[in-house]
Image (cartoon, helix red, strand yellow):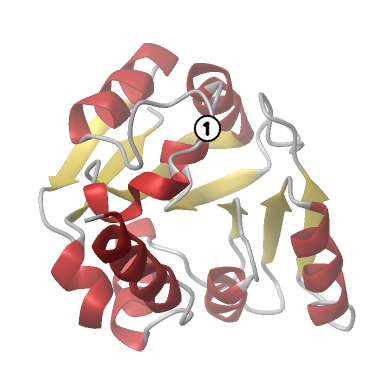
Amino acid sequence: MRTLVLMCSVLTLAACSQGASDEESARIIDILEISAGQAAADIGAGSGDYSAVMAEAAGSAGHVYATEIDVGSLASMRDRFATSGNVTVVEAQVNATGLDPGCCDAVLMRNVFHHLTESDAVVSDIYENLRPGGRFLVVDFDPTWVLSLWTPEGHDAHGTTLDTVRGAGTSAGFRVERVFDEWDRPGLEGLLMNHHATLLVKD
């Protein structure tokens, strides 16, 4: 059984690392309403794939902040966006984004919430980072046995629930604008994991 779990976990992790799909990218930009001249943030940006998508939508008059904690990812993104005129790579902390208050019109957190050890503090910080009317999209997946071998430290399972995301958002002052019980993902990742999304708005 452990061998089966390991094989499924490795295959799923490989699927998750394939980068931004065109369909999901378009959906994210549409829901966050990112357009030319706006400022947005990609929290826990990893390789920066979605940061690049957001930067293209924001255009040269807009700006994107790609935040990360991982040292390797920070270095990789700094190389990737070295010549970009509208992407800034920001080192985050476990309890803070590293961003200035009121700096953003939109914030994305994709497959990151379930890793947070101080989620209430981070979500409250994001509330402060957003301007009035700002939109915060959290995409994640239900707790799953498939990735049980990589359960984040301090968590009972790998993944998070819609209720947990909603609770953190409303506690920070956000209004729940829209909930996506099923957030389609292509291939093996979509087959083995039930993704969901929550759109939060700062009134």
Res 84 → quadrant: bottom right
Given residues 180 and 113, the one toward you in this image is 113
| Image quadrant where one finds the N terminus | bottom left
Question: Which residue occupies 25% across, 41% down?
Answer: 143
Q: Is residue 195 left or right of residue 201?
A: left
Q: Position of residue 22 (x, y in %)?
A: 36, 87
Residue 184 visible, this orientation: no
Question: Which residue occupies 53% across, 78% down?
Answer: 53
Q: Is residue 84 above or below residue 116?
A: below
Residue 115 visible, this orientation: yes
Q: Is residue 12 left or right of residue 185?
A: right
Q: Position of residue 123 (x, y in %)?
A: 50, 27
Res 165 → quadrant: top left
Q: Is residue 142 left or right of residue 202?
A: left
Instruction: Looking at this view, name the residue that lies furthest to the left.
Output: 181
Question: Which residue occupies 69% across, 28% down?
Answer: 96
Q: Position of residue 201 (x, y in %)?
A: 35, 35
Pointer 1 residue: 116
Question: Which residue occupies 23% across, 31% down?
Answer: 176
Q: Position of residue 140 (x, y in %)?
A: 32, 49
Which amino acid, by three-letter code, is at mark 1? Answer: Leu
Question: What is the crowding at mark 1: few (fewer than 14 residues within 10 Å), some, or many (at least 20)?
Answer: some
Given residues 100 and 10, the one toward you in this image is 10
| Image quadrant where one finds the C terminus | top left
Secondary structure at numbered mark 1: loop
